[in-house]
Image (cartoon, rainbow, N blue to C red):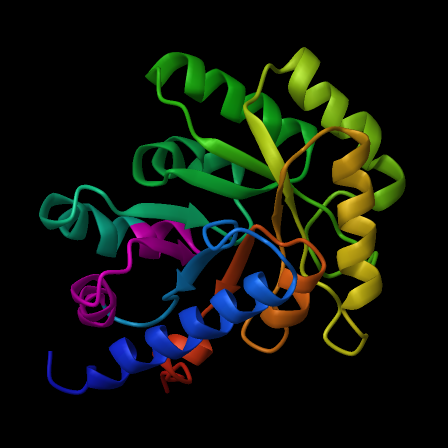
Amino acid sequence: MTGYAHIAANLAEVKARIAKQAKDWQRAPDAVHLVAVGKTHPAEAIEAALAAGHRVFGENRVQEAAAKFPALRVRHPDLRLHLIGPLQSNKIKQAVEVCDAIETVDRDKLAQGLAAELAKSGKRLDLFIQVNTGEEEQKAGILPRDADDFIRRCRAEYQLPIVGLMCIPPAEEHPAPHFALLGEIAKRHGLAKLSMGMSGDYELAIQMGATHVRVGTAIFGVREVKA
């Protein structure tokens, strides 16, 4: 794994920062889970993180996850994979096969498809509802004004195992109000898990109650852009 020595050091640094924030805000050391986001990075980079003892990963695209993780799971059966990018309805079956958690449930058609596939497969995944807290037209996620009814439908009508909420605040805005809004919606529904915070703001997210932070660049480095 020549060329990936930096990953173990970066992981240690990020985990130390997470632990410090948890301690400073009087949270249990294991209250915050690090989702290491390896999108566009090769399987060798993920292997380096696995060798350093990390086991929870995130991918944006189902196809990329399916290409990298089945072989890694054979060698590391305790790894857990979160899908953190938009999920197309025609990729539901593959996502359920490959992933352990899907963080981007955001519409009824997807919820219905997931309910059918989970019933068929007998598999249980942790599902998060993505909330578009910034109401950005180009971004996935249920709008905040529609979130309460959608959460209720997912749980009562579709019988989905919803465990929490996820958001990606607008890049040009301070994330704190968005983290606070996500927390308020989750509290109304008794949802304990909040996936919020990335490489640039995960420490703030922990202060505001994040249980899962999605960190890629700070661990794996800047992604290479293919020509």
Residue at the spot 68% in from the left edge and 69% down from the top edge: 204
Which residues are the magenta region? Answer: 43-65
Residue 176 picture quarter: bottom right
Tell me: residue 108, above or below residue 196: above
Of 142 and 199, the residue lying toward us: 199
Tell me: residue 214, above or below residue 184: below
Q: Is residue 97 left or right of residue 125?
A: left
Give the residue furthest to the right.
145
Of 55 and 62, the residue lying toward us: 55
Is residue 163 shown to the viewer in this render? Answer: yes
Q: How many marks?
A: 0
Quadrant location, the N terminus = bottom left
Q: Position of residue 179 (x, y in %)?
A: 75, 58
Q: Position of residue 78 (x, y in %)?
A: 22, 43
Q: Position of residue 55 (x, y in %)?
A: 29, 53
* 46 inside magenta stretch: yes
Residue 47 picture quarter: bottom left
Residue at the spot 43% in from the left edge and 13% down from the top edge: 119
* 108 inside magenta stretch: no
Residue at the spot 60% in from the left edge and 78% down from the top edge: 200
Quadrant location, the C terminus = bottom left
Q: Is residue 218 left or right of residue 188?
A: left
Is residue 60 shown to the viewer in this render? Answer: no
Of 78 and 95, the residue lying toward us: 78
Residue at the spot 68% in from the left edge and 63% down from the top edge: 207
